[in-house]
Amino acid sequence: MALAATLLRFGYPSCKPNAPAGTFRYSKPPTPAVNGVLPTINRSSWRCTAVATAIRWRGKKDVVEDEDEWPSYVTPERLDVLREMEPWVEEHVLPLLKPVEASWQPSDLLPDPAALGSDGFHAACLDLRAGAAGVPDELLVCLVANMVTEEALPTYPSGLNRFEVVRDSTGADATAWARWIRGWSAEENRHGDLLNRYMHLSARFDMREVERTVQRLIRDGMRVPGPVRSPLHGFVYLTFQERATAIAHGNTARLTGTRGAGDAALARICGTVAADEKRHEEAYTRIVGRLFELEPDAAVRAMAYMMRRQIDMPTAFINDGRHSGREFYDRFIAIAQQAGTYTISDYRGIIEHLIRQWGVEELAAGLSGEGRQARDYLCALPNKIQRMEEKVLDRAAKARNKPTPIPINWIFDRTISVLLPD
Ligand SMILES: [Fe+2]
Ligand SMILES: [Fe+2]
């Protein structure tokens, strides 16, 4: 449920529509990394000062005080546009859901005692454990975060059901929008199941600690990014998130596979989830793309609104029992960057992709002054991120910090070394 904001708070992806917004922090400018890896944690506070944190920084000039703007996105006229889109959603979005009969299930990708019998199941579990044995700890930690945010699924349809018009108001609405929300949730539900079961069978995780983390995340909740009731803002966020999640799962597949850590089963699992996320990304991309056609000014302003603000990922709300909030999130971002499951380059790449996808650069006719401002802001954003990225990496190369081991309870307190500033 797996970002946002202009110089953005770099966030770890998840495909979920929930995360806080509107809480602006002006972090200090970047702190360097070392040896091409990311800088990370402040020795005194255990707060990361990684590249991730670096790109999270932004100047005040980037923030437009438009908190009062969002009610304009839920006026009756604007909401009618969404109502009138329903036949289009039926035709262009719902077909992206797969029928249950054609969908993979976790049992297809894991040892199945019903199919293998007792001895076969036991042997298959030993094979799975042998494959998992070589996966490095930093990848295991990223896998936990992916799994935990997938397992917090009950929170996410709640977010969508706060949006005007598109919500499933009864829990069984027949509208195309409502059927999409339920179908999407049902597909997502398999992701956490699959990752959870793999993790359980692999015996490489302290599952009780992981399970407690899931419970805390659902209990604590998350605030929907941007205007709580505005579907347009929510769909922008979801498009970003689904793409980011697909990238993260895909990177995990690549890094754990036969050319990486040698766990072919895990690579297949992550690759399968990534393919789902790509389909979901396509759905939200189409929806926002359609809104760019129908209301380009509103759409580009909504996209800029989301990018200017810092869209925290659901990962930002994880509490592992030792750290929560920014203390947890910053440390985790550094690990993810170091592991390569999701990097600042991925983040920048997503923004570039969405700008191209929705033709932001070509927008001209019909834009208001604010719309043109939003367009120009978005088009300048990737270069701004890249410059900061280069600056941080350059400073990192000059730094001479030594890695510091961080114990992680999800993996029995084994440590992950992160680079601390002097
Ligand atoms: Fe997703
Ligand atoms: Fe997912």
Image (spheres, rainbow, N blue to C red):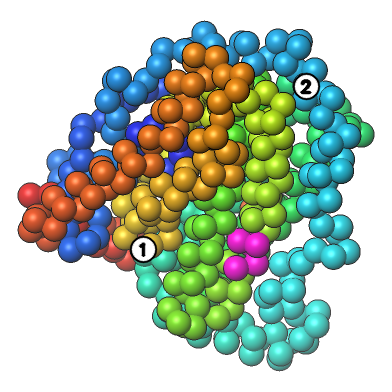
**Mark 1 sits near ligand 2, with its Cβ under 8 Å away:** no
Q: What type is the residue that disc 1 sits on?
A: Ala
**Mark 2 sits near ligand 1, with its Cβ under 8 Å away:** no
Query: Which tag, 1 or 2, sits closer to the chain's start?
Result: 2
- SS assignment at label 1: helix
Q: Which residue is tagged 1?
A: 339
| Image quarter (top left, top right, bottom left or bottom right) of the N terminus | top right
Crowding at dot 1, Cα within 10 Å, few <14 / some 14-19 / many 20+, comes out as: many
Q: Quadrant of residue 78?
A: top right
- SS assignment at label 2: helix
Marks 1 and 2: which is nearer the front?
2
Q: Is residue 210 left or right of residue 287?
A: left
Magenta stretch, residue numbers: 271-275
Is 328 rendered above or below residue 69? below
Say which of 295 and 1 sits in front: 295
Magenta residue check for 4: no
| Residue for point 76% across, 10% down | 76
| Residue for point 50% across, 35% down | 361
Q: What type is the residue that disc 2 sits on?
A: Val
Residue 394 appears in the rendering? yes
Residue 326 appears in the rendering? no
Residue at mark 1 to residue at mark 2: CA–CA distance: 43 Å
Q: Which residue is tagged 2?
A: 81
Q: Is residue 40 left or right of residue 353?
A: left
